[in-house]
Image (cartoon, rainbow, N blue to C red):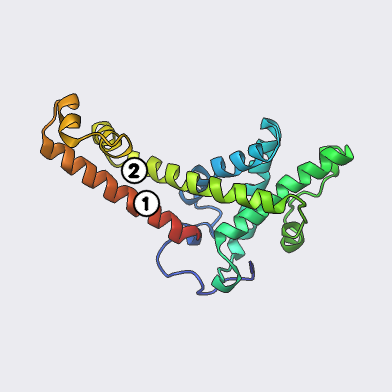
Amino acid sequence: MSLEPATDSLPTRQSLLSRLRDWQDDGGWREFFDTHWRLIYNVARKSGLNDAEAQDVVQNTFVYLARRMPNFHYDRTRGSFKSWLRVVTRSRISVFRRREKSGAPPLQEPFLDAESDGDSIEAIPDPAGDALDELWQREWQTNLLEAAHRRVRAKVSSQQLLIFRMASAENLPLGQVAKKLDVSIAQVYLARHRVGRLLKAEIEKLRRETE
């Protein structure tokens, strides 16, 4: 992933990634953190780190991203932001593994300071890389769907969400859903359609932003 100063590599639309170039964009960074911190935490935990170590991985990863994003250059030929985030997360996990093996205290580990060479940090070898990459892919898909659901929840009523879950996830007949919730069949059709459409749109938006 190239991180040279950007010009017009990102789309002209105000995408989330373009907003992250401005470290003072609190809303953009909050949205980005809310979308991805669980992914990084879950990958760290499932790779063998304890809760405190996984939280440190999350913190160090976002500190690094905050310092690198102003110069983020999206080059499709070099890979996606998703791939870069995976490599950065993997390097932080690798640091904890090496520290545990060597017994070195935390302060002796290289930290992601403003002058550090990000490419060297990202190039840290990980002997468990293949297994972690497979874990990342699984967690990425799960996190993508969960993030999309969280965004949709802010746009629809709890009743519409319940109708969608019962009609789609639980695959109940629509007439049965209407009877259980004491609503009309038309309300069930409309809620299922609206929530499904919004969910699909949010998933596609997340993919465009990061993949």
Residue 143 x/y as whole percent: 49, 44
Give the crowd class for mark 1: few <14, some 14-19, many >=20 residues within 10 Å. many
Task: Name which quarter of the figure residue 54 lies in.
Answer: top right
Horizontal relation, residue 159 to residue 152: left or right: left
Residue 89 visible in the snapshot: no
39 over 114 or under it: above or below? above
Q: Mark 2 falls on what kind of element?
A: helix
Disc 2: which residue: 152
Horizontal relation, residue 20 to residue 171: left or right: right
Residue 91 x/y as whole percent: 72, 52
What amino acid type is highlighted by mark number 1?
A: Glu
Does the residue at mark 2 contact the one at mark 1 (Cβ under 8 Å)?
yes
Residue plotted at (55% across, 64% down): 80
Residue plotted at (59% across, 59% down): 83
Label 2 and label 1: CA atoms lie apart by 7 Å
Say which of 159 and 13 sits in front: 159
Which image quarter is the N terminus in?
bottom right
Give the crowd class for mark 2: few <14, some 14-19, many >=20 residues within 10 Å. many
Say which of 113 and 1 sits in front: 1
Residue plotted at (77% across, 49% down): 111
206 over 181 or under it: above or below? below
Horizontal relation, residue 151 to residue 87: left or right: left
Q: Counting residues from the N terminus, which is met first, the one under dot 2 or under dot 1?
A: 2
Residue 112 x/y as whole percent: 73, 51
Residue 126 visible in the snapshot: yes
Horizontal relation, residue 208 to residue 120: left or right: left
Please tell me the numbered disc located at residue 202. 1
What amino acid type is highlighted by mark number 2?
A: Val
Residue plotted at (40% across, 40% down): 150
Say which of 195 and 55 sits in front: 195
